[in-house]
Amino acid sequence: MIRRPSQPRERGIPEATVARLPLYLRALNGMAERGLATVSSEDLAAAAGVNSAKLRKDLSHLGSYGTRGVGYDVEYLIYQISRELGLTQDWAVAIVGVGNLGRALANYGGFVSRGFRVAALLDADPEVVGDHIAGLNVEHIDELETVIRLRGVSIVVLATPAAAAQQVADRVVAAGVTSILNFAPVVLSVPEGVDIRKVDLSIELQILAFHEQRKMDRMTGGPAMADEWPEAVDL
Amino acid sequence: MIRRPSQPRERGIPEATVARLPLYLRALNGMAERGLATVSSEDLAAAAGVNSAKLRKDLSHLGSYGTRGVGYDVEYLIYQISRELGLTQDWAVAIVGVGNLGRALANYGGFVSRGFRVAALLDADPEVVGDHIAGLNVEHIDELETVIRLRGVSIVVLATPAAAAQQVADRVVAAGVTSILNFAPVVLSVPEGVDIRKVDLSIELQILAFHEQRKMDRMTGGPAMADEWPEAVDL
DNA sequence: GTCCCTTTGTGAACCGATGCACAAAGTGAG
DNA sequence: CTCACTTTGTGCATCGGTTCACAAAGGGAC
C-alpha cells in the first residue's frame, strides 16, 4: 500500500501521546498569539514541560509535519493536532448535576474556547430547575433523553452526587452517548465501547498528602507513627 | 537485615500504586459502612474497578496484611492505607483564587471528609475579599505568606486565572510549601522537590473528543475530512 | 492429626512508554 | 556546486507497570 507523503502513519496513536496533544496545542496557541511562525521541538517541548525526544516521537505518530533544520510550522501544526483531536468539529456537551461544581463547569471558559459547546444543563432538584446559568436554562433530568437526541449531545459531564451517578450514566448510555466525563466519586460500570474519564479532586489531594508525608518523614528521619495497629481500635 | 512480620517491605511504593490507594480506600469505606468484616482481593478489586492481581500486588507493597484463605480485614486495611497515605494526620489546605471553581472547591465535601481542612481562601480581587464562603472569610492575596506560616498550610490549591498561576506558585514555594494542586491551564515551573498535580478540565474533554471522533470514523468507514491543509488558511 | 478448599503473595513473561543517540534531510553561505 | 550547521525522525536499549499462573499459607471438616 502506497502512502502519500505527510499522511498520518497508521491509525493507532498511543494513549499517552493523545493525553499530551492538548498540552502541545495549548503551547502552540500561545506561540501563535505571540507571532512565532516556526518552532523547534526543543522549544515546544520546553513550553509544554516535556522531553524533546518524546515530543518528536509524539508528533511523528500524526505524520511527518516538521522540516529538518528548521522545525515545525506553528499554524500548520495547530491545524493538524486540532484535526487529530477532533476539535475542528463542534461538540455538544450536556452537564448533569448543577451543584457548586456543575455551576463552575458551566461557567468555565476553557470549554467553549475549544469547540466544546455546553448544550444543556440538567438537574433533578426542582429548586434548581428553571435557573439561568451561563446563559442556559436548567432543565429537569426527565428531559435527559430528549435533550441528548434533539441537540446531538455526544459528551456528557457528570457532576451529580455519588449516589445518582451510576443511574444517570445508565440512562445516558442507553440514549446512545459513548463519552462521559465523571466528577462523581464512584467507579461507574458501563458497557464495552463507552469511554469514561474520571476527575477526582479528593484523590489528587490524597496523592499529594502521601508525598508530603514522605518529605516530612525524610526530614525527621523516619515515620513518626508506629507501624502497628493501635491497641484501642476505633475508626 | 531482619524484618518483623507484617512490616512494610522497602520504602518505595510505585507511583501507579499510590494513585490507586485512594480508590481502594473509598471502596473499603463503603464496605465498612455496610458492616463487612473481611473482603477478598477479588471482591475489593471488583469494587475498585481493577484487576485482582494488580490489587494484591499493590497491597503487597504496603506489607503483608492479608490472610490466605480468608482475605483482608476491612478495618485493618483501612487503617493501613490511611496511614500510608498520610490521612491519619490533619492537613491544612489553602485555596488561592475564589472564582467559580474556587468556590466549588471550598464547598466540596470530599476534602473535609479525608483529613483535609480548608484553612484559608485567598483572592486578589477586592470585590471578593471579605466574602464568606463555606464558613470562611476570603482574605487578600497579600496575606498569603502570613497565612501559610501561621496556619501551617502544607498544601495549596491553585484555582486562579492562568495568567496569575505562575506568580502565585512562586510565592507559595518561597513560603515553603512543597505540594500544589493546580487547576490553572498552564505548565508551572517549580524547583526540584516541589510536587505538582494538575487537573485540567479542558484536556479531559479533548481526550474524550479524540476517542469519540475515532468511534464516529469507524462507523462511517474513515475520516470525513481530508488530511491536507485547506487552501484558505485562516485560524 | 490429615485432607481439601480458599485465597494470598510473588516470580516471570509481557507490554507500552521513555529517552538516548545518531543517521537522514533540510538550510544557507560561499 | 560543496561544506558546515541545524533539527527532525527513529532504532534500540531500558524501565515501570500489568497480567498470568502457581506455590505457599491458612481455615475448617472430620
Image: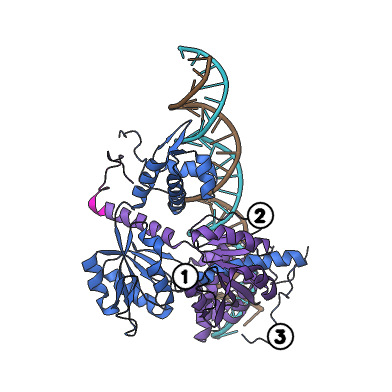
Chain colours: A blue, B purple, C brown, D cyan
For marks 2 and 1, the one nearer the N-term is 1
Q: Is any part of residue B21 visible from this angle?
A: no
Range of residues picked out in magenta: B218-227
Task: Classify the position of the C terminus of chain A by image quarter.
Answer: bottom right
Residue B198, compared with residue B123, is above or below; it is above
Q: Position of residue A151 (x, y in %)?
A: 23, 66
User: What's the CA distance linking mark 2 and mark 1?
Assistant: 28 Å
Determine if the magenta segment contains residue B94. Answer: no
Q: Amino acid at mark 1?
A: Leu
**Contact (Cβ within 8 Å) of mark 3 with mark 2:** no
Residue B225 is one of the magenta-drawn residues = yes
Label 1 chain ID:
B
In the depicted structure, whether residue B3 falls above or below residue B224: below
Q: Are marks 2 and 1 on the same chain?
A: yes
Q: Residues within 10 Å of mark 3 (few under 14, many from 20)?
A: few
Residue B15 pos. (x, y %): 58, 60
Q: Quadrant of residue B135?
A: bottom right
**What residue is pinned by disc 1?**
B101
The picture places residue D30, in percent across and down from the top left corner, at 55, 85
Question: Nearest the camera: B117 or A37?
Answer: A37
Q: Is residue B5 left or right of residue B38?
A: right
Question: Which mark is drawn over residue B192?
Answer: 2
Identify the residue under disc 3: A231
Q: Secondary structure at mark 1?
A: helix
Asked whether, in this view, residue A229 is left or right of residue B126, the answer is: right
